[in-house]
């Protein structure tokens, strides 16, 4: 638990030491992660690759602060985040993390503009008008300026994933996390999304993308392999 | 850097309304459930107040600021109220009007049949003090009292018995003498018997006191009615009458001196207790409405699990989620309270307008019912809202 703090240079946005996670408190326990060590530098585009069931999503949930029940130490932006309160984590998640999911996870009853402004609204540091303006700008950057008042169900799946990326970027997060972002897309749309990631990466974004597909992983500049809940190449 | 709390509240209110808008039908039914509860409480208080006013009006109808005294006839050597007592009563400060009553019995012949009749000898003040209502003709005048005229005012019962044979302007026979019928009366309230059997009820003829005293052997005054000048003067008059009886008679316990106050106090207490019982029963429906809110909110939270998970993943705080769902429950109960008050106060007022009855709607009860119903909604919304806020984010996102 109390691993010595590694050289927490600002350049390392994500640093994990000996992170382990077991599902199920008693009875049938599944050791999803067993001693993960990894470091991701600012501006890197990393693919976390491994077979289905190897623990990639579990790892990404811990990185994204939505899973807090694990052992080991995790530094985000140089700050130890393991053991923080739910309140602190919510704020941190809101400002530092942008999530993109395989199934988009847009709220179906809202327009994509309303979806995209949610992280800004929950940040509570801007007026509703400002939040809307930022969300609109992000959606326009994703080529959705003409679809702002559409609901996700009225859009193509490629457009939905672009809307989800716009939402993830609204608060200008330190890290963009994507769990199988192309898993629900055909290859042409998948390429479109990967192009967007490449463009964001060129502009300086830090991206961590989970995938089981070597072709998709090839879009990243660095690949971390997960096998049976362990990484061999997590540290640079 | 956090913006003002009102902005936060407004944002969550927006989310709450959006959540409710997604299930209008169910929200409407839940509001209705809450409205019925609120309406019952408001309505029951109105019914209770109406009942209380009715009972009080019955008692007050016997006579305003009334004090009366009579002798118990149960003692072995009874003492009676006499006309010297009456004279002393008249000098008590605070007595505005006074009517001694002598009661005698006569037998009249009605269509050849013997008919017992109570003959009341009293002064013209009696009609005022006892709130008598004239059905026809007029009451005994001061002039007729001072000259001992043979005139009679009939009770409605007696007038009905005599209908077709005689009436106002006609004649009846009492003490083998002809009495001219000048009027027909009824009592201000039918059920003066609620207080005590009224001497004026039944088959009765009222004649001038002086006339009866010249025809009857009776000298004992059966009952004396007094009207105090103001409601506040009633207690003083009761004390004054008691004092007169104490000084002029051997045993003051032989006499009863009463005002209507004790009956009013009792009637108010009884109807207030009854109202409270009714409110307690109505409150059960408020409780049922609250459980309806809890039910609907639990369903909502379950259905929106993924929605909640997404919001939390995007950085919503747990208190944001808690407050959003608490507000949804609060809006439902608030709307239920408003609709309930509209029904609970509107229907009685509407019926009152139609039937020309003054329906009391207590604004305090409206306020309390409203606050209680909102509180009930928030209370029952707390558990579902807590469940929403406590969700495991990864599970909520629908991951395996
Ligand atoms: N909520 C859960 N409860 C129990 N076991 C789980 C749960 N989520 C994942 N697992 C198990 O943990 C292991 C890793 O899962 P996951 O991180 O989803 O893998 P991946 O994303 O690489 O497919 C798998 O064996 C999976 O069955
Ligand atoms: Mg996975």
Image (spheres, coloured by chain):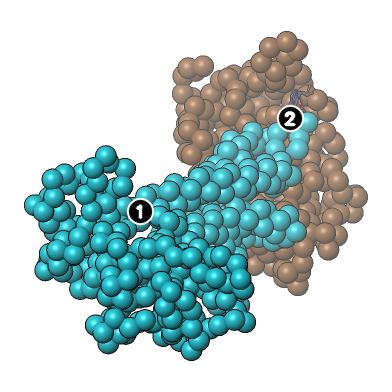
- Inspect this view and state whether residue A228 appears: yes
The residue that label 1 is drawn on is B263
From the image, state whether disc 2 or disc 1 is nearer to you: 1
Residue sitting at x 86%, y 40%:
A215
Chain letter of the cyan region: B
Residue sitting at x 53%, y 24%:
A73
Image-based side of A56 in relation to A12, left or right: right
Q: Which structural element holds mark 1?
A: helix
Image-based side of B14 in relation to A54, left or right: left
Identify the image quadrant of the C terminus of chain B: top right
On the image, the x and y values in percent for residue B85 come to: 16, 61
- Does label 1 point to a residue whose CB lies under 8 Å from ligand 1? no
As rendered, which of B246 and B384 lies closer to the eye? B246
The residue that label 2 is drawn on is A56
Outermost residue, top side: A27
**Colour for chain A in the figure:** brown
As rendered, which of A198 and B223 lies closer to the eye? B223
Q: Is residue B280 above or below residue B164?
A: above
Q: Quadrant of ligand 2?
A: top right
On the image, the x and y values in percent for residue B312 come to: 61, 44
Q: Is residue A234 above or below residue B2?
A: above
- Does label 2 point to a residue whose CB lies under 8 Å from ligand 1? yes
User: 10 Å neighbourhood of mark 2: few (<14), some, or many (≥20)?
Assistant: many
Identify the image quadrant of the N terminus of chain B: bottom left
Image-based side of A152 in relation to B273, left or right: right
């Amino acid at each position: 638990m109390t691993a010595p703090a590694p050289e927490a240079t600002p350049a390392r946005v994500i640093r994990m030491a000996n992170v382990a996670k077991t599902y199920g408190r008693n009875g049938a326990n599944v050791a999803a992660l067993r001693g993960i060590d990894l470091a991701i530098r600012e501006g890197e585009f990393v693919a976390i690759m491994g077979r289905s069931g190897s623990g990639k999503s579990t790892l990404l949930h811990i990185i994204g602060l939505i899973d807090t029940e694990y052992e080991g130490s995790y530094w985000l932006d140089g700050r130890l985040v393991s053991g923080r309160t739910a309140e602190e984590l919510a704020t941190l998640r809101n400002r530092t993390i942008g999530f993109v999911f395989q199934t988009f996870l847009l709220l179906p009853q809202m327009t994509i503009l309303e979806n995209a402004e949610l992280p800004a609204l929950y940040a509570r540091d801007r007026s509703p008008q400002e939040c809307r303006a930022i969300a609109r700008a992000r959606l326009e950057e994703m080529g959705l300026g003409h679809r702002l008042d559409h609901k996700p169900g009225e859009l193509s799946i490629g457009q939905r994933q672009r809307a989800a990326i716009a939402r993830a970027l609204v608060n200008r997060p330190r890290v963009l996390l994507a769990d199988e972002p192309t898993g629900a897309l055909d290859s042409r749309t998948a390429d479109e999304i990967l192009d967007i990631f490449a463009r964001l990466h060129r502009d300086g974004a830090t991206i961590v993308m989970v995938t089981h597909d070597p072709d998709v992983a090839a879009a990243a500049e660095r690949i971390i392999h997960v096998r049976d809940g362990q990484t061999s190449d997590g540290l640079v | 850097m956090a913006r003002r709390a009102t902005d936060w509240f407004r944002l969550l209110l927006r989310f709450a309304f959006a959540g409710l808008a997604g299930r209008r039908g169910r929200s409407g039914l839940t509001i209705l459930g809450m409205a019925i509860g609120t309406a019952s409480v408001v309505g029951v208080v109105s019914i209770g107040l109406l009942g209380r006013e009715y009972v009080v009006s019955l008692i007050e109808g016997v006579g305003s600021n009334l004090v009366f005294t009579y002798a118990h006839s149960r003692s072995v050597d009874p003492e009676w109220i006499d006309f010297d007592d009456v004279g002393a009563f008249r000098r008590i400060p605070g007595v505005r009007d006074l009517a001694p009553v002598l009661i005698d019995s006569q037998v009249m012949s009605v269509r050849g049949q013997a008919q017992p009749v109570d003959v009341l000898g009293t002064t013209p003040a009696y009609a005022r003090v006892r709130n008598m209502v004239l059905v026809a003709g007029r009451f005994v005048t001061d002039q007729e009292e001072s000259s001992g005229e043979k005139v009679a005012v009939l009770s409605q019962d007696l007038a009905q018995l005599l209908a077709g044979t005689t009436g106002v302007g006609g004649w009846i026979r009492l003490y083998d003498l002809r009495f001219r019928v000048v009027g027909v009366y009824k009592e201000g309230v039918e059920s003066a018997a609620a207080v005590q059997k009224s001497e004026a009820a039944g088959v009765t003829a009222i004649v001038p006191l002086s006339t009866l005293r010249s025809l009857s052997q009776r000298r004992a005054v059966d009952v004396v009615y007094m009207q105090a000048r103001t409601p506040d003067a009633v207690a003083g008059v009761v004390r004054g009458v008691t004092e007169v009886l104490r000084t002029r008679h051997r045993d003051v316990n032989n006499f009863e001196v009463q005002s209507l106050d004790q009956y009013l106090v009792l009637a108010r207490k009884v109807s207030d207790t009854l109202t409270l019982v009714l409110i307690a029963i109505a409150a059960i429906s408020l409780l049922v409405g609250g459980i309806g809110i809890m039910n609907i909110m639990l369903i909502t939270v379950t259905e929106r699990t993924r929605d909640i998970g997404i919001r939390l993943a995007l950085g919503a705080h747990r208190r944001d989620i808690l407050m959003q769902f608490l507000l949804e429950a609060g809006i439902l109960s608030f709307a239920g309270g408003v609709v309930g008050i509209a029904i609970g106060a509107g229907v009685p007022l509407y019926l009152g307008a139609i039937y020309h009855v003054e329906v009391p709607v207590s604004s305090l009860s409206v306020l309390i019912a409203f606050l209680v119903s909102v509180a009930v909604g928030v209370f029952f919304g707390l558990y579902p809202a807590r469940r929403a806020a406590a969700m495991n984010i990864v599970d909520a996102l629908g991951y395996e």
